[in-house]
Image: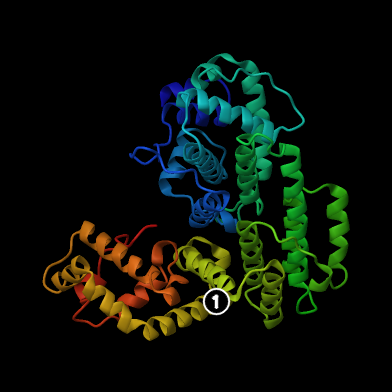
Amino acid sequence: MSNLLKLQGGWLARYLQFRSTQPFPSRLPAIFPPPPPPDEEALDRQLYAKVHETGMLLGCPVVSAEMQQQARRLRFPEPQGGTLFLFLETLLRLVREEEELIQTPSHPIEVRTTWHLVQLLQYFLPESYYQLPTNVPLPELLQNSEVLHSALHRVEKALLEEVAIAGYSNDPRQNAFVFLHIYTFLRWQRALRLPAGPPLAVIRQQDMQFRKELLLALIALIWADDQITDIERQVITNYLDQSGLPFSVRREMLQHLQRPYRLELLRLERTTPILRQYLIEQMILLSLIDNSQAREELELIAGTARQLGTSEEELELIYAAVADFFSRYASRFTFLHNNPAVRQMQEYVEENVIKVVKLNLGRIIREIQETRELYDLLIKAGTTPLTEEERRRVNEQIKDILKAIPALALFALPGGSLLLPVVIKLLPFNILPSSFQEAPEGAGARS
């Protein structure tokens, strides 16, 4: 670490040096031949799982103590260091994983990291031109290139403006459009691998159009009950400031706050599933801001989902995914404390989970009895405490059973924090005794 701190340049240079000497582990399966490359929707599902689990999709980043500590070691700026570190870790990890999944890397990781850096510069400094060699290992380039350090200094300013924002109380918060930076960058990386993929300028233009449609949908949402509260007005104003849209466009959109803007005026493009889901999740989040979810707002969210081609089942899953995230991390965010709208949404989802589990309880028990290892472990738990590895296997096998039951697959969310506790509570005592129910915190499944 001492060598990192002696490196000339700022926190971004220190981070890149750290990641070039300690690269992310390979995710390639140890089989031959390798599996066929995944399609774009499969890559998007991987991306969604990552940004949802970290809270970046909702602008509420979950920064671990380890990440916060690493950001401090690298002297990231305070108090935004943790959110900046999470953004860089997420973006570069996804770039690495997609690169490995799509094509077999043919160059050392130190050189590939240089390529990724050059592309990062092009993305955040689109109007600038820096002539940097792409065949030099990044540690060497960081030690010898003053041009690179000048560019990195400018990128640091861009990241502070476009990723991190001032916290709400002590909450870590991110720019509401951080996810779109990650998605747009990855779309561009995918396009670079195609013979005639669209250039970055076209992809960024599509991104700006989507941002505009998202903001119009949010404005229609706050007008749903024919009035705008002060906090809703302030949130929309903040979103416009963070959007990166041209000033003339933002000024025009501010005029929609002066008189009702209706869903009928909105013509949303039926874009990719991940963007549709992101737009709806942002609407759900905004509906919670003033501690209430008006009936008109819920109806407008449902109407927007229909316009986007999102089914009622998919909308139910999106609500459940938001509730799942907040059920795990609500204590981290002060704006969620004592928020009746969040509790109502969680109760609504939990009621549906309980109802569906009860209807399928007989099949769950039959599936458990037919899964011999699982059944034996649950019986064993009645007399002998299970090891951490055994508890993990129990959770994973129960999750596999739930995913195989169509009515329950809808609620088989990351971490299973809504579904698994309900199943555990409703299973017969002699099948799942108290010694298992009282398993230490953190022993649950991880997706």
The image shows residue 434, relative to residue 148, as above or below, that is below
* Side (left or right) of 259 relative to 392: right
- SS of the residue under disc 1: helix
Q: For mark 1, does the 10 Å Cα neighbourhood hold few (<14), some (14 to 19), or many (20 or more) residues?
A: many
Q: Residue at x 52, y 80 (%)?
A: 348
Q: Residue at x 37, y 58 (%)?
A: 446
Which is more toward the observer, 147 or 37?
37
Q: Hey, what amino acid is under mark 1?
A: Met
The image shows residue 217, relative to residue 160, as above or below, that is below
* Side (left or right) of 397 relative to 341: left
Percent position (x, y) of residue 199? Answer: 72, 36
User: Pointer 1: what residue?
Assistant: 345
Q: Is residue 351 visible?
A: yes
Number of marks in the image?
A: 1
Quadrant hosting residue 192 = top right
Q: Is residue 166 visible?
A: no
Q: Residue at x 45, y 23 (%)?
A: 108
Percent position (x, y) of residue 27? Answer: 40, 41
Quadrant hosting residue 254 = bottom right
Q: Residue at x 77, y 31 (%)?
A: 127
Position of the C terminus, as image quadrant, is: bottom left
Position of the N terminus, as image quadrant, is: top left
Which is more toward the observer, 223 or 431?
431
* Side (left or right) of 279 relative to 433: right
Percent position (x, y) of residue 268? Answer: 76, 63
Q: Residue placed farthest to the top in the image? A: 144
